Image (tube, grey):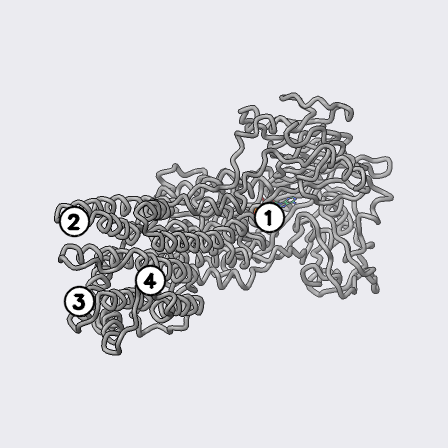
Amino acid sequence: MGLTENEAAEKLKTEGENVLAENRQAGPVKIFIGQFKDIMVMILLGATVISILLGEISDAVTIILIVLLNAILGFIQEYRTEHTLEALRSMTAPTAKCWRDDKLKEIEASKLVTGDIIELEAGDRIPADCAVLKAAGFFSDEAILTGESVAVSKSAGSPEDTDNSLNKPNIVYCGASATKGVCRAKVIATGKHTQMGKISEMLTDIDREPTPLQKRLGELGKAVAVICLIVCAAVFGAGVLRGENVFDMLMTGITIAIAAIPEGLPATVTIALALAVSRMLKQKALVNKLHSVETLGCTSVICSDKTGTITENKMTVTELSTVSADYYFSGIGYRVSGAVTKGDDNIAVNPTAEKSLTEALRCGVLCSTAEISTQEVPKSRNRGALAGRGEWQVTGDSTEAALLIAAAKAGITRESLSGSCRVLGEYPFDSETRFMAVLCSCGSDKRMYFKGAEEVLLPRCSQYISENGAPVPMSSAVRRELAEKAAEMSDRALRVLALATCSSDTLEPNRRNLVFLGFAGMTDPPREEAKTAIRKCAAASVKTVMITGDHKNTAVAVAKKAGLLKGGLAMTGAELDALSDEELDRVIGKYTVFSRVEPVHKLRIVRSFKRRGEIVTMTGDGVNDAPAVKEADVGVAMGVTGTDVTKQAADVILMDDNLATLVSAVEQGRCVYANIRKFVRYLLSCNIGEVLTMFLGILMGMPVVLLPVQILLVNLVTDGLPAVALGMEPPEKDIMNRPPRRSAEGFFSGGLMWKIVIRGVFIGLSTLASFTTVMRLGGSLEACRTAALITLVVSQLIHVFECRSERRSLFRMNPFGNMKLVIAVVISAAVLAAAVILPQLQMVFSTVDLSTPQLLTALGFSAAVPVISSIFSKK
Ligand code: ATP
């Protein structure tokens, strides 16, 4: 079926890749040129032109060299950032299940060609325009193309149809999503030939928008730039009026501008966010949108699925209860071993002799689309029990796989049934209807088999299968006993599925008068990491809420095991329906478990928490979860079990479906925000220090304190590297022991602005003090400038260590806690040392050798402020 790999490769050459728009990725040249589109660089280039016009060639060359060096450093960082983001983009590239060389393979959707045959199921994003060959209850949401919000039913048409005009019932369109059912389809148009391709400019690329924080800081940078340009103009005007040399004053004005503009800020924020994204990826959380990194850090409520996220998603049928007997299955998880016993006495049974058991297991096998396989040939021991050592490989739904494995323990497999029964049609499982059905031809008889939630199927049963395999009418006493049995099983944290059958010539999913076969009870133990993650959230004042389609009793039992129900209450979807929005908002804070929930309920839960001012992170996997995932402040999709549609709606994808991974991402989110505050504090206080040095110097009638090249050197050595290294600080130990930050909280909350201004003023004053003291000691103007340069740079390099924590003072931190910062500071200090010691660089930077008292003065003033402030600091 389908094409061969060779045919597909040939076609790919002629048809081109199945992509809609050219990737607008920035190339290295563009990134490099981008480095010069920066206010500071513009000002510097202006200064260079002026220097050349006035014949100051050596100044011009120095400035150009510094600009180039700065551009190269910026380029390296931005290129790496771009690379990380690009790698992320390719990881979220869509895939398609396609028949090639007669095998069903998962391939990149971009490699599809016309003629390929693909399989689609609910939740898939349709990768190309295709003609439907076979469909079972298949619906597609084409709103993106037609604006029609109701999903349209699709059915098979002519396999030769290649006309992909819109609104055809036998064509599925690229970009639309499968909302229900399954279908097989043949690709008829790819890439820009699809309907979607024709309107591809409507498509939104992965989010490249600046994050709110980036925007706010960008605006801050611009405001600072404007203020400083005004200051420059004032200084220039005042100097010229005072009769100073116009060129000198121009250069001084420019120098102040360079000193003041926090040009590294936006780039450093992007780098910090991108690095956080790649750290999160290592921990298996793929962040689609940079802004989610920030929002994750403010999360106050995590709404999590149960299966796979809090539990292992290794469903194991442990018991099967028919009206005549209870059967128990040994063997854990997906292990290829286990036996079937009967009753409380654990009597080994010969499954084939147990009519009601085999009928129920048969139903489970036929009513399943999952696949199990194993490398080893399972050895059949006495009485059909399995005794293998390996594990089953499972594809598809874990609930169904569990039924297949249980049946295999009793010697019943799809292969063993294939001689007697053939599946003719399927009504697929849906979390809204909570059941599925198949139509089978079994010899001369045609039957339907059902499996689904107990409340859905038991009321539709009017008979049950007796011990000898014959149907018997169900009395109300038996019905009551069965309902009690199901409740008792779910109280023990078992997921309970009812199995039923009836004879039928056609697939009629709403049939009543079914014959009850049995209840399959399956366990899915909570993950150990999830228990730890839930405890961690509690310490971090983040509320964890479990939302599940399962029965209330099962949900409550699992929640207890996972440590989720301490003081919390449980509510069912039906109870939620009975509440108005206002009532729900009033009580929702008390609930930690929501059971028998349908996707629409998830949306109400998210909205209600949001109305209460919470920042909600919501996980989802099924196609119907997409609206809730989109509505949440941070939408999270499951990487393993999640559908394409949910992944597309999500901000974060958990590659391992694990709650613990999500909680680590929240921790990273908090950490990166704290780190951004750290380097903003650092960069701004340094800039204020530099401007004040220059500005006060002029006001006090002193010669220009630092020359333009010296200020450039300061900016280059102290701004860039240490700030980026601060952005890589590991999380502070108590970061998950504090309540989440409120999202409306200002960036400079907690007195940060004051800390910045005060420290900036001190840096400026100590630099000026160093300059004047050396002057008093009889030093030359060059010596005074050299001393001021050293004081400025060293005090900043000490300050960077203070910025590592807002709570602890310099001497209460391990200085080697962030080795990247230590290395950055050592490099910066070495550059400074070279600039003041090496004769060649002394010429470039107009520095001179200092006498010991001059050097001690310079270093003394650098250390004074941090030492004094640490002594007065309480922590
Ligand atoms: P969880 O995250 O706990 O798995 P969910 O919302 O994904 O919850 P669903 O998979 O929608 O839950 O299942 C809801 C109910 O539907 C289950 O409790 C079960 O009774 C029934 N059910 C689940 N899977 C199947 C299936 N494959 N076939 C038939 N019925 C199913």
Q: Which residue is mark 3?
A: 772
Q: Which residue is mark 1?
A: 91
**Proximity of marks 4 and 1: CB atoms separated by less than 8 Å:** no
Q: Which residue is mark 2?
A: 239
Residue 74 badge: none
Q: Position of residue 541 (x, y in %)?
A: 37, 58
The amino acid type of the residue labelled 4 equals Phe
Q: Nearer the viewer, mark 1 or mark 3?
A: 3
Q: Nearer the viewer, mark 4 or mark 3?
A: 4
Q: CA distance from mark 4 to mark 3?
A: 20 Å
Badge 1: how crowded within 10 Å, few (<14), some, or many (20+)?
few
The amino acid type of the residue labelled 2 equals Gly
Q: CA distance from mark 4 to mark 1?
A: 48 Å
Q: Is residue 470 left or right of residue 610?
A: right
Sequence-wise first label, 2 or 1 = 1
- Residue at x 55%, y 59% (from the top left corner): 282
The amino acid type of the residue labelled 1 equals Met
782 is higher (above) or lower (below) than 7? below
Badge 3: how crowded within 10 Å, few (<14), some, or many (20+)?
many
Q: Looking at this view, is 269 or 93 the one in front? A: 269
Circle 1 SS class: helix
Q: Position of residue 639 (x, y in %)?
A: 59, 49
814 is higher (above) or lower (below) than 161? below
Sequence-wise first label, 4 or 3 = 3
Q: Position of residue 789 (x, y in %)?
A: 28, 65
Sequence-wise first label, 4 or 2 = 2
Q: Position of residue 7 (x, y in %)?
A: 80, 37
Q: Nearer the viewer, mark 4 or mark 1?
A: 4
Badge 2: how crowded within 10 Å, few (<14), some, or many (20+)?
many
Circle 4 SS class: helix
Sequence-wise first label, 3 or 2 = 2
